[in-house]
Amino acid sequence: MKKTHRYILLFLAIIINALFLSGCWDQRELDELVVPFIIGYDYANEEEKEQPDDRYLISAGFPVFYEDTLKKYHVDITSGSLDGEVINRRNTHFGEQIIQGQLQIVVLGEELISNENIMELTDILSRNPAVKGAIPMAVSAGRAADMLNAPVKQYPNPGIYIQMLIKNIRRTNFFPTCSLFESNRHIISNHTAPLLPYIVQKDGNIMFAGSCLLNEGKRIEHLDREETEIAVMLRGIRSRGMITFDVIEDNKIIDQVTFEGMNKRKVDVKKDGDRYIFNILIKLSGRLFERKKNEPVIDHKDFIKLSQKSLEDLIRKRAEDFVAKVQEEYGFDALELGMEIKGHSREKLSKEDIDKIIQESEINVEVKVQIENAGGKI
Amino acid sequence: MSYTITSKQLLFTLISSMLGVGILSLPRVTAEAVGQDAWLAVILGGIIPFVSIWLSNKVVSRHPGLSFAAITEMLAGKWAGKLLSAAFVIYSIIASAAILRVFTEVITMFLLPRTPILVKIMLGLAVSAYMTSSGIKVLGRLNEFLFYVLLPPLFLSIPAVVKFADLHYLMPVLNNSLTDYSKAAFTTGFAYSGFETIIVFAPYVLKKKETLKAAVMALIITITIYLYAVITTITVFGSELTQMFTWPALRLLSVSEIPVLERMEFVAIIAWIGVAIRPASNQYFCAGLIIKDVFGIKSLSKVVALLYPIIAAIAWYPKNISIAIRLSDFVGMYSLILGTALPLLLLGLSLIRGKGRARDEKNT
């Protein structure tokens, strides 16, 4: 082949490639896109239904980028029989194309999640590769739509506020976060009930008020703040937080202190015949954050030791109460032991098997507190 | 044979032939077969390619200086030899098309959902055709260069592993029957398909003594990368959840976020495009080279141009992703059969002919 022929062929190839530039089919103008960053799931009330068969109501919070608009945040509420139908209908009253890739948070209405399986509700998100698996989820007291519309004083919109709240809660409180992927992993791989944070509206604010256990993907139990902290520690959800407690010496309260630190869990599994024995060790390590009595810590040579012991006793008592509740009242795996059980059994265990093991096993709790320092004051 | 490759280039060419799109679905197929023991299926799956590599090297080393097409014709006779070459050509064409189609499906899902499949196939194949027509030396160098492109996407899964991996998901170990493990080893066929190309590439290696070592090293590197992909995916998702994702190795990248990059799966896919095109190009090259040798065509480019519409049509044929996956499964099985039966047959013929020749020489 002559050199000129090669150049002609190369030129033709470039022209054909340019014509076939695949980006042409997938190109989208930025101005024509809208990016929801929070969505809420609820049941549709009669007056909210667009069609009689509609079941779900999906609210989506969008930032508005246009300059001359009254609001910079818009919540679109649309009903449908399935998520896909809602999205389809939403497109009929939305000028821009909706992009799901930037979704930051999913809020599930309390009533809906009490009756519907979370995996079925969020199937559209798990199926869409544009939606990240790390997207966090929360259960709202009342309807999610109301939560998305709630006025928040110090933030531009509730979407950003809830997102920040959930992102940081594990760094400041012994509270759980649960992403879409973690929830699916608990249900499918571990046969464990996911623990989702529970948010409420109070005095014009959106705030955390504990958590929710979702047995078989449905909300079954609401845990208050104290139970949530213990559940987080028992499940080994790594977080940081503060606990205020009384320091006890010879059955007498000698002081009140605040501990600040992080938690870890270690589980030891044994089998006595067919019966499982779980020894859960909760480890707390951190510092003495506050002390009521204005006395030097070194004045009492055993003060740190006593503080550790008092906190250990307190956490152990609460943990034992929670374990008893799980075994006697709930009857399902709320302690994230499913994975341990499956790892130690050569039989293929179903959810029912795991639940039965949880109910019948011996679960012991040990707590070890390590107070490393007492801050900048002696 | 006017062109040669170094043993190092053979190593990267074989890795490139095996390592492409199969890695993305490998955790799912192995977890479906043997659950938490999926990693064992990866190791067992490497046995057949190892046997094939050994046999192929034996065949090629007994006939130095001859290409694959020439070896088959010399050992099996003119027409039977051409038939054996044809079997390899058909396999390579289908394998190239299947790899390209699966590659296109991933691109469709993650990057270009609205672009017609045919356009993506034609563009991907155009790149392959260009690589292929440049000859074995360029292909060898590209395979080596693109191997290093693969490494950064592999490490992108580390944040997810550090944050979420749990070794309990690999327990209990050895909890399946021997039959299950054997079946599982076969299910890895598509992931390992490409090892059989050694019989085509080996005759071009400069230092023949290093061929086997390079090929075995290529297999070990591939097994190691596959093990990494399978173990990381299963320790994060658990074997049950792994089975629910079409491309679990990619999904793994979406479970954690790192600052600045945020969505790591898209970064990985962009880097991976260059990686995934290599096995299709290598198979394309094998088909083109064998046809060129069998028919005595001087220009490889002409054969490549001739094959282009055929491969594009086969890649375009599957109507949906499940048919595309079935096609890739078929390629996996075909590669295992072809990769072992063909060199075994050729070695058998070579031994028989060798003995005959020795007897003739003795009689003379």
Image (spheres, rainbow, N blue to C red):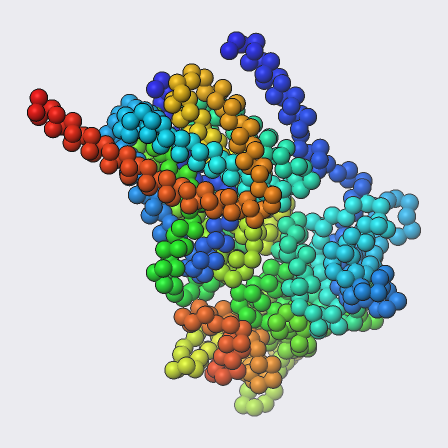
Q: Spot the residue most to the front.
A: B79
The residue at the point 40 percent across, 50 percent down is B186
How many marks can you see? 0
Give the image location of residue B203, x and y in percent: 32, 27
B217 over A244 or under it: above or below? above
Residue B271 in sight from this viewpoint: no
B223 over A20 or under it: above or below? below
Give the image location of residue B59, x and y in percent: 27, 33
Give the image location of residue A309, x and y in percent: 52, 81
Given residues B159 and B154, the one toward you in this image is B154
Q: Quadrant of residue B192?
A: top left
Residue A68 in sight from this viewpoint: yes
Give the image location of residue B189, x and y in percent: 42, 46
Rendered-image quadrant of the C terminus of chain A: bottom right
Given residues A244 and A200, the one toward you in this image is A200
Q: Spot the residue most to the left.
A: B363
Going by the image, does B220 lie left or right of A325?
left
The residue at the point 47 percent across, 57 percent down is B31
A351 over A8 or under it: above or below? below
Going by the image, does A21 lie left or right of A60?
left
The residue at the point 55 percent across, 87 percent down is A249
Q: Quadrant of residue A311?
A: bottom right
The residue at the point 28 percent across, 23 percent down is B65
Given residues B52 and A265, the one toward you in this image is B52
A294 over A160 or under it: above or below? below
